[in-house]
Amino acid sequence: MEYVIEAKDLTIMYNGVNAVEDLTFKLKRGETLLLLGPNGAGKTTLLRVLAGFHTEYKGYLKVFGKSPLEVKDRVAYVPQTFSINSRVPLSVLDVVAMGAIYKRGIVHFNVPREVIKKGIKVLEFLGLKDLSSRSFRELSGGQKQRVIIARALMSEPELLLLDEPLSALDPKARLEVTSVLSRIKEKFGISMIITTHDINPLAEIGDKVMLINKKLVAFGTPDEVLRDEIIGKVYGPAS
Ligand code: ATP
């Protein structure tokens, strides 16, 4: 199937009140979509619907040709904030391994050996192996973000949704996270949607850009959308 996502006149509500209105767009397999829009534009809301977490919507929406709920297992969501409530400090490898364990809906106290092996492989692939025995809690923001991306890969998703993976990171950490995303794209060909307020480091890996402000403002290639006259429509004219 050519399209990972097909949305037509998609309207998303919270208790009957529209948060996102009449979105029509398609995403092809292997493509990376950068999702832009001001605060409150509906970016997180759209990701949560695609991930099958929020189901109050109307209009046509197919993910892998099915409803988001039916394909939840094929989609991974990396939230904007991630914290771990654990009385014992968890290692990076523990946190990554949990990505596979939760998928099966079982919490093991003894993590199976094959999961550990897979976790090490994923960390290695993302250049994070040196962190594996460090305490997750003690990592920097940029390291944490890369680890939770690694954790999302453990469920072998075909669609990866990332909510502002660069927010609150310094420029160096932004580049490091971007390089991890670019590696994932090259190696696995996973389709991705990345919400961001800062297009700069990500522009290279975006095949498509969608600008929303409750409704669709623009959708197209980065060259088509990242133009002052289009961005200015929602963010005001460039100074
Ligand atoms: P930001 O860039 O600030 O993260 P966003 O583009 O992700 O913003 P959303 O968080 O999706 O925007 O919010 C879209 C709209 O939906 C806003 O008007 C918000 O107030 C509303 N909204 C979000 N979550 C809920 C909720 N749980 N209940 C009711 N309204 C909500």
Image (cartoon, grey):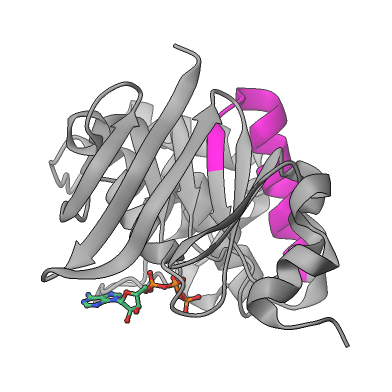
Image quarter where ligand 1 lies? bottom left
Q: Would you say the magenta stretch is mainly helix, strand or loop?
A: helix
Task: Give residue 46's position: percent from left, percent from top.
Answer: 37, 56
For image coordinates 62% across by 31% down, the residue present is 31
Q: Is residue 233 left or right of residue 155?
A: right
Please name whichever residue, 78 or 87, is drawn nearer the observer in this view of the structure.
Answer: 78
Q: Is residue 211 left or right of residue 24?
A: right
For image coordinates 50% across by 15% down, the residue present is 2
Is residue 97 among the parts visible in the rendering? no
Q: Is residue 180 left or right of residue 25?
A: right
Image quarter where the C terminus lies is bottom right
Whether residue 124 is in magenta: the answer is: no
Task: Give residue 13's position: percent from left, percent from top.
Answer: 21, 64
For image coordinates 57% across by 69% down, the residue present is 37
Whether residue 174 is in magenta: the answer is: yes
Task: Give residue 120's position: percent from left, percent from top.
Answer: 53, 37
Please name whichever residue, 72 or 5, is drawn nearer the observer in this view of the structure.
Answer: 5
Is residue 136 among the parts visible in the rendering? yes
For image coordinates 18% across by 37% down, the residue present is 69
Q: Residue furthest right?
A: 239
Q: In the rendered view, would you say 205 is above or below 174?
A: above
Q: In the rendered view, would you say 8 is above or below 78?
A: above
Residues shaded magenta: 173-192
